[in-house]
Each structure stands twice: as C-alpha cells, then as structure tokens.
C-alpha cells in the first residue's frame, strides 16, 4: 500500500504542476503559512463583538463544507475509469491490467488526498497558527486542540462525501436519498432546534468541551471518539460498496441538442450553449450541483437562522449578508462546469477559448439564478426580513456576477488547477476579500437603520458591477490567444 500511495502522490503532484512551475506550486504552503499566522495574530480584532463559540461554529461549518467538496472520490474515480483524458491514463485504471482490487485503489485515493492536502494546506496552516499564537500571545495547547478538531472534522466530512459519491456511481436514487437525508438533518436542526449541531458535526461537541473553552475531557474524548468512528465507518462502507469494475455506466437521453437550440435561439452563440447543456446533462452535473452548491447553501441558511433565533444572538446574519455569501459558493459550481470534459478537441473546431468561457458563464447564470434567488427569499422569510429582500437580491446578483466573472478572468477553463497557483490565489483572495468584508460590515449595520449603511452597500454593488464589466471584457484580452491544449 505504501508504494501505491507513493505513486498516487506523484501522479497528483504532476497533475497540479503541469499548469504552473514547481516553484510556484511549492510556494502555496508558504502563502498559507503566513496568511494563517496573520489571521491568528489579528483574531481578536477580527472577531470584534462576536463570541468565541459563534466563531468556532462558523469555522467548523466551513471546514465541514470544505471536506464535503474535497471528498468526491467516487464520482471522480468513475469519471477516470470511463473516459481517457487525452494521452493521460490514471493509476485508478490499473486493476484492468494488474492484480489489484478497485477497493484498494479507492482507498489509495482517499489516503492520497488526506496526505496531499494535509501537507499542502493543513500542516502549513497549523504552523502559521502556532506562530500567530506565539506573537498574540495565545495558548499553544488551545491552538493545537482547535487544529485537531478541525482536522478530524475534515476527515469525517471527507469520508461522508466519499460514501455519498460512491452511492452516486451505484444508483442516482441512492445518491439523492443520501443527500436528502443530510439536508433534512440540517433543516431539522435549523427549524426545530430539537437537537444540537453536534448531531451534524460531532467534532463541535469535542471543541466546546476542550480549551480554549472550559475543559471537560470526558465529554470531549467521547465526541472525538464518535467522530473517529464515523470517519472510519463511512470510509469502510464506501470501500465495501464501490464496484466500478462491474460495469461501465451508459447514459441514454433523447435528442436534446435541437430542443436546446430552439430554446436558446435568442441568445448569442446558441449552438455552443445548446451543446453545453447537452454536456451538463450527459455528465450528470445537475445531480452533482445538488451536493456542491445547494447543500452548502442549505447549511449556511439554517446555521444563520439558528444563531439569530435559536441562540437569540444578534450577530447580524441577515438576508443582505446571506445574499453576499451566495456568490462565493457559486465558484464551486463554476469549477464543476469547467471540469465536465476535455477541451483538446476544440482545437479542431472554429471556436476560441473566450467563446467557450462566455458559454460556461451563460450556463452558470441560467443554472444558478433561480436557485440562489429562491434561497435568498427563503432566508428573508425565515428571518422575517421582507423589508430587506430587495436589497438582498441586489447584493446577490452583483456579488454573483462579480465573483464568477473574476474567477473566469483569472482561471479561464482550468479553475481547479489554477487555484493551486499562489499568484492567482493571492489575486483571487484580494479581489474577493475586500468587498466581502465591506458588505459584511455594512450588512451588520443596516438593521440599526443607519442610512449610510444602505448607501454604502449600493455604492459597493455599483463598483462590483463596473469591475464585473472590466473582467468580462478582459476575458478576450487575457485568453484571446490561448489554446485548448
């Protein structure tokens, strides 16, 4: 297993470095180290009046969502088996040629990503947190225990995502049942408060009973043990169920292209957009969208509802704040849209890279506008903030357009790979962090009736629209001479 894991780590490393130099790729851990140190050092200032428990809830929720997004090994594995990526052939296909089981290969994929992302991101983050704690100063023990909880949370959510994605490869109905159960658990927590969030994220029970909170080591150890058992259990069940070698999935659909062509005839490039939606249907992206886009939105909406109503804490998570956050989740879906297929064959067609990027953008807005609008309306209803709905929708549309156009401008058709380039990641952080902070601060102030907060939000939205136009026009300048290979 050690030799297999070593080969998979080399494969993963080569996949990422082919889009940038080794020097640039290896500078990413340094970037994370210094960013984590700066964040930890300024934590008290950044928290303001927010309670430590509320901040931990947000951090653990974010790590849980991140683990869910990373753990789609089953879906990716099935894709690697069914399609040959140009000249590349992946180690996952070796059971067809060598005496090794698919379960062993999928376990290797799981361990590969645990080791790879731990070394690339998590361990540098821990080093930065410890450095920031020394400068602040904070307790090194507390920082270490917080990191332990976050790491176990990452493993639990990654294993759960692995299991759910394996169900996706077996039967889409099982996948939808599993996702529906997860969403029902989140919704039930937010609406009824009949159980604690520890039922969804058990590591929260560990954290709230370990430093920097008052220590109750018996309860903390119990929750940590439960989390470890769940992580191993989800992984073991996924490995038992995975059977990609039994058959290759063949999807059949009616003639969708002509129907799509008629429906998009009023738009520019209807032929490309029609093909894009055929690819979306063929690749099963609509089902993946539920897991990658809708589940995080549900989790965020009911977390904010619970903080505002269940805990009765006036943190300020209103519908305007929520509208600003939705745009950031859209980046996940855009990355899926750019990863549905290879683009090499486009070199033989009379199309250019900017045309395909604009087609992806059009598909994104068609797919997400109704869903994101429905979620903002729902959060307004849950918080009884109908008077803020119009402003929340304005913020939603402006931030969504800004974030996705900025992502498309920076990464083109290789979003997943280019985000491992520290230069691009730094630009993306700068582009996204400032407006996010401004809108968050202003949204917290608007409920007090401050007229300047309303004016400030509208000004920020106006600037975002101008920058969105800049990024949209810049796609042609930046990617006009790029090739698909």
Image (spheres, helix red, strand yellow):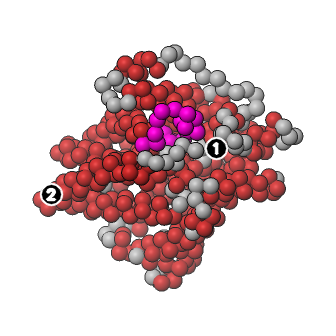
Where residue 438 appears, x then y in whole percent? 28, 62
Q: Residue at x 53, y 79 (%)?
A: 131
Where residue 318 appears, x then y in whole percent? 27, 52
Vertical relation: 339 (above or below) 64:
above
Label 1 and label 2: CA atoms lie apart by 46 Å
Residue wearing tag 2: 455
User: Which residues lie in the magenta part?
Assistant: 336-354
Closer to us: 429 or 245: 429
Quick one: which residue is furthest to the top in this view? 254
Q: Quadrant of the C terminus?
A: top right
Where residue 166 appears, x then y in whole percent? 65, 37
Residue 436 falls inside the magenta stretch: no
Vertical relation: 404 (above or below) 447:
above
Q: Residue at x 77, y 54 (%)?
A: 7
Closer to us: 171 or 80: 80
Residue 338 falls inside the magenta stretch: yes
Vertical relation: 402 (above or below) 284:
below
Q: Secondary structure at mark 2?
A: helix
Quick one: which residue is furthest to the right in this view? 99
Residue 381 badge:
none
Vertical relation: 118 (above or below) 187:
below
Please tell me how crowded label 2 is: few (under 14), some (14-19), or many (20+) other residues with Cα within 10 Å: few
Quick one: which residue is furthest to the left in this view? 451
On screen, residue 160 versus residue 401, left or right, reads right
Residue wearing tag 1: 73
Where residue 287 appears, x then y in whole percent? 51, 32
Q: Earlier in the sequence, mark 1 or mark 2?
A: 1
Q: Secondary structure at mark 1?
A: helix
Closer to us: 448 or 110: 110
């Amino acid at each position: 297993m050690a030799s297999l894991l070593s080969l998979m780590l080399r494969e993963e490393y080569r996949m990422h470095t082919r889009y940038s130099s080794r020097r640039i790729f290896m500078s990413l851990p340094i970037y994370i180290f210094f960013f984590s140190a700066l964040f930890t050092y300024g934590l008290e200032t950044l928290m303001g009046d927010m309670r430590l428990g509320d901040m931990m809830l947000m951090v653990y929720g974010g790590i849980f969502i991140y683990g869910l997004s990373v753990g789609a090994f089953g879906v990716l594995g099935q894709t690697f088996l069914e399609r040959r990526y140009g000249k590349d052939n992946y180690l996952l296909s070796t059971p067809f040629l060598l005496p090794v089981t698919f379960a062993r290969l999928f376990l290797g994929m799981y361990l590969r990503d645990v080791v790879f992302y731990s070394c690339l991101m998590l361990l540098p983050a821990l080093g930065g947190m410890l450095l920031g704690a020394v400068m602040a100063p904070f307790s090194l023990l507390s920082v270490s225990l917080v990191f332990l909880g976050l790491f176990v949370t990452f493993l639990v959510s990654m294993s759960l995502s692995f299991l759910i994605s394996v169900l996706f490869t077996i039967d889409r109905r099982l996948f939808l049942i599993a996702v529906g159960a997860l969403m029902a658990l989140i919704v039930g927590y937010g609406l009824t408060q009949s159980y604690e969030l520890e039922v969804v994220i058990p590591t929260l029970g560990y954290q709230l009973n370990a430093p920097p909170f008052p220590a109750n080591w018996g309860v903390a150890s119990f929750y940590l043990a439960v989390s470890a058992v769940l992580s191993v259990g989800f992984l073991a069940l996924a490995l038992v169920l995975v059977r990609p070698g039994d058959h290759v999935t063949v999807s059949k659909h009616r003639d969708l292209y002509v129907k799509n062509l008629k429906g998009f005839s009023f738009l520019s490039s209807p032929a490309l957009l029609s093909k894009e939606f055929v690819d979306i249907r063929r690749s099963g992206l609509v089902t993946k969208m539920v897991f990658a886009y809708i589940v995080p939105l549900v989790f965020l909406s009911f977390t904010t509802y619970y903080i505002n109503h269940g805990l009765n804490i006036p943190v300020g998570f209103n519908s305007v704040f929520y509208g600003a956050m939705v745009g950031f989740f859209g980046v996940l879906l855009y990355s899926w849209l750019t990863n549905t297929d290879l683009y090499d064959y486009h070199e033989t067609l009379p199309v250019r890279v900017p045309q395909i990027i604009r087609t992806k953008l059009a598909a994104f807005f068609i797919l997400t506008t109704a869903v994101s609008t429905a979620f903002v309306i729902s959060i307004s209803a849950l918080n009884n903030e109908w008077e803020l709905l119009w402003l929340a929708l304005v913020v939603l549309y402006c931030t969504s357009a800004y974030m996705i156009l900025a992502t498309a401008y920076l990464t083109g058709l290789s979003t997943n790979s280019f985000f491992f380039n520290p230069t691009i990641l730094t630009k993306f952080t700068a582009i996204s962090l400032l407006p996010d902070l401004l809108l968050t601060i202003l949204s917290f102030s608007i409920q007090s009736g401050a007229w300047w907060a309303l004016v400030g939000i509208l000004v920020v939205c106006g600037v975002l629209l101008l920058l969105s136009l800049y990024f949209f026009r810049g796609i042609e300048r930046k990617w006009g001479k790029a090739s698909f290979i």
